[in-house]
Image (cartoon, rainbow, N blue to C red):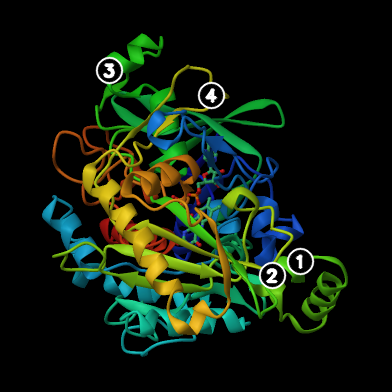
Amino acid sequence: MDEFDFVIVGAGSAGGVLANRLTEDPKIKVLLLEAGPKDTNPFIHIPAGFFKTLYDKKVNWCFSTEKEDAWGNRAIHWPRGKVLGGSSSINGHLIVRGQPDDYNGWAQLGARGWAFDDIADYFKKFENAQVGDPSVRGKGGPINVREPVEKHPLTERFIEACVEAGIKRNSDYNGVAQEGVGYFQHAILNGRRQSTAQTYLKQARNRPNLRIETEALTRRIVVEGGRVTGVEYEQNGQKKQAKAGREVLLSSGSIGSPQLLELSGIGDGDRLKALGIDVVHNLPGVGENLQDHYLARMSFRVKGAVTYNEKSRGIRLGIEVVKYALTRKGMLTAAPGNVSASVKVMPGVDNPDVQFTFAPASYVDGLIGVLNDFPGMTCGFWQHRPASTGSLHCVSKDPSVQPSIRPNYLGEQIDRDTVVESAKMVRRIFSQPAIARHVESEVFPGADIQSDDEILGYVRNSGATVYHPIGTCKMGSDPMAVVDPLLRMHGLPGIRVIDASVMPRMVSANTNAATLMIAEKGADMIKAGMR
Ligand SMILES: Cc1cc2nc3c(=O)[nH]c(=O)nc-3n(C[C@H](O)[C@H](O)[C@H](O)COP(=O)(O)OP(=O)(O)OC[C@H]3O[C@@H](n4cnc5c(N)ncnc54)[C@H](O)[C@@H]3O)c2cc1C
């Protein structure tokens, strides 16, 4: 059996950072196991290829939620990267830190050492920012962060309309204040995706103290004598074991981490027994506290401008492909979101509570993926910090059965009210002169949907995930916490969880930047503990 200091399970956003940072020390021997393949699929690297990998089971787990009335009795598609780089290889490239109070809130909930002042430098550490004030932004980090290469004229009209509606312009929402409207910042360099595979792992992969194994599915965390000692995994149909002399670092993401823990007998004892799984460590918080952003969309038929709907067809698409091949510019460098507005929507809130996004494209049935055959634009929005929490648990001891995903979208009244008020704000923005002259008609939900109940009904029946599940192995010190503030598992030595699942509460942001920050800090804490 092979022996390492650390075995990292999952080469996603967090796993990629950890593998690099730990092996900076040549004395530390690391095995990185990834269930998916190498990131050779070309659509991973072209920013607009996002739409191609969204449903591709070769690089994506393609999970789905349970069907529940609260979201129109639909199973909502939940993509997750299953490839080197994990979800950072298939995500929307957006880099958003969130608000200082998000992290101050974590600290108040028991995650000591995670208040904003404690973690701010780790946001700087992962980035090489081409925007913003250098005193608050990072330079020289592995991930290049920039504004969109191509700024479609309608995006500028949308920003102007927001300003006309009373939202201030903000040139750097990752700077001192998030509030306002401006261009999204993307993890893109020279027109190509900056996943952790293409940045952190590329830098580290030739180090003799790092071994990376792809198509290696971890089946079980091995516990011997009351301590985690390694993992069992499967590769090319063969069962293998790897020993972790120091620790197993679980970085399988908000779905994979709780799933693997439960399959290994770590979780709520009664729940595990009911599935016929031997209880190794009773930890009731595993798989609880699931939080996600629920996306609503409104779309408009456009007049007086050419949108990506037309540019994605025929000769225009041909021109874009050639432009991208020759110059790494044009529509194919566009991520799914171009503009971000962080806004206070509900009365009396201290901080922005809703994020709006804009794209000069629209989709059949409002669903992301298939573009309309007429000119269109879309405004998406979600509540920054939903109050609803759900759960995610194994329903079988067979690892090939996906866990039951119940995000409890719109479960709390405040979440329902916020979504309705946000839809009204979208209509206010699109009635401002700067953009109103490009609105031929509202396609979704359409002019006949007016009352609060009708708007809520529309959102229930058409909403989707923003792909931001967090919280299923939360950090803290209460009985439902899975890891402590050093990310060590409560009550079981030899294992830490380091990925998006440890966030105790949702951040006011797309979750990749916070995950990278967690992994940077996690690596530092591990190294500090070893000195
Ligand atoms: C389609 C999509 C779009 C998104 N867009 C954005 C965006 O624009 N901006 C943003 O900030 N966030 C975005 N996100 C969210 C963001 O990418 C995630 O929050 C972040 O990548 C989570 O990192 P992670 O390390 O926790 O998990 P992941 O990056 O998902 O990594 C987990 C890894 O573990 C592997 N794994 C799981 N189980 C096992 C096992 N048993 N054995 C071995 N390997 C295993 C997986 O295959 C995966 O590679 C998006 C996510 C998706 C899916």
Task: State the SS at label 2.
Answer: helix
Earlier in the chain: of badge 3 and badge 1, it is: 3
| Circle number at residue 497 | none
Q: Position of residue 351 (x, y in %)?
A: 21, 68
Report the Cα–Cα distance between label 4 and label 3. Answer: 18 Å
Tag 1 and tag 2, C-beta contact below 8 Å: yes
**Amino acid under disc 1:** Ser
Task: State the SS at label 3.
Answer: helix
Say above or below: 250 vs 523.
above
Q: Quadrant of the N terminus?
A: top right
**Amino acid under disc 2:** Tyr
Say above or below: 135 vs 375.
below
Q: Nearer the viewer, mark 1 or mark 4?
A: 1
Residue under numbered circle 4: 399
Task: State the SS at label 4.
Answer: loop
| Circle number at residue 308 | 2
Could you say which quadrant of the image residue 312 lies in?
Answer: bottom right
Categorize mark 1 by other alpha carbons within 10 Å: few (<14), some (14-19), many (20+): some
Categorize mark 4 by other alpha carbons within 10 Å: few (<14), some (14-19), many (20+): some
Report the Cα–Cα distance between label 1 and label 4. Answer: 39 Å
Residue under numbered circle 3: 269
Earlier in the chain: of badge 4 and badge 3, it is: 3
Q: Relative to residue 175, is residue 337 drawn left or right?
A: right
Q: Nearer the viewer, mark 4 or mark 2?
A: 2
Residue under numbered circle 1: 312
Report the Cα–Cα distance between label 3 and label 1. Answer: 52 Å
**Amino acid under disc 4:** Pro
Earlier in the chain: of badge 1 and badge 4, it is: 1
